[in-house]
Amino acid sequence: MSLQFIGEVPVYFPHRQSVKLSALSGDTLIECYATSDALRAMGCAPEDDPMTIVRKFEARRLDFEIAALVKHRRSLTPMATVTVTAADLVFIGTPAAA
């Protein structure tokens, strides 16, 4: 089943160094995380403050959503969580930010 992203604001988790968005797959809530290496590939720097990370993530949000969608669709087992890495972004042809 496909993911439907709900229009929520991304949430940055400093302890995980990740950003989370939620999506629906039918009636199931799926948590989608961008790892620290995915955030770096999206143009975020380790020294960026949380607001800057969220702003940079929002600028590349569609890339993240596509990577999460592809990863979810290719899963052989049901997933409650999708973790998007830099490799997933490269796989969809997203160039790293300058």
Image (spheres, grey):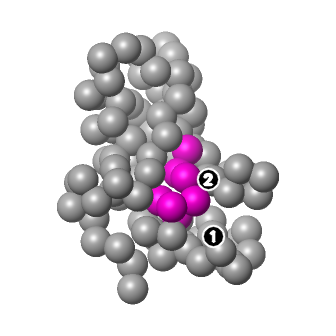
Question: Going 30% across and 17% down the picture, which residue do you hit?
Answer: 76
3D distance between C-alphas at marks 2 and 1:
8 Å
User: Is residue 14 depicted above or below 73 in this figure?
Assistant: below
Identity, as a three-letter code, of the amino acid under mark 2: Val
Question: Going 28% across and 71% down the picture, which residue do you hit?
Answer: 95
Instruction: Compare marks 2 and 1 and give the one earlier in the sequence.
Output: 2
- Residue 88 is situated, as x and y percent measured from the top left of the image, at 34, 50
**How many discs mark residues in the rendered view?**
2
Q: Residue furthest right?
A: 15
User: Is residue 69 depicted above or below 81 in this figure?
Assistant: below
Residue 19 can be seen in this image: yes
Question: Going 76% across and 57% down the picture, which residue do you hit?
Answer: 14
User: Quadrant of the image for the N terminus?
Assistant: top left
Q: Are marks 2 and 1 in contact (CB under 8 Å)?
A: yes
- Residue 17 is situated, as x and y percent measured from the top left of the image, at 68, 57
> In the figure, is residue 35 to the left or right of 77?
right
Question: Is residue 10 located in the magenta-colored stretch of the structure?
Answer: no
Label annotation for residue 19? 2
Q: Secondary structure at mark 2?
A: strand
Crowd rating for badge 1 (residues with CA inside 10 Å; few <14, some 14–19, many 20+):
many
Magenta residue span: 33-39
Q: Secondary structure at mark 1?
A: helix
User: Is residue 24 depicted above or below 21 in this figure?
Assistant: above
When asked about the image quadrant of residue 22, the answer is top right
Q: Nearer the viewer, residue 91 or 49?
A: 91
Question: Is residue 35 located in the magenta-colored stretch of the structure?
Answer: yes
User: Quadrant of the image for the C terminus?
Assistant: bottom left
Identity, as a three-letter code, of the amino acid under mark 1: Ile
Q: Which residue is mark 1?
A: 53
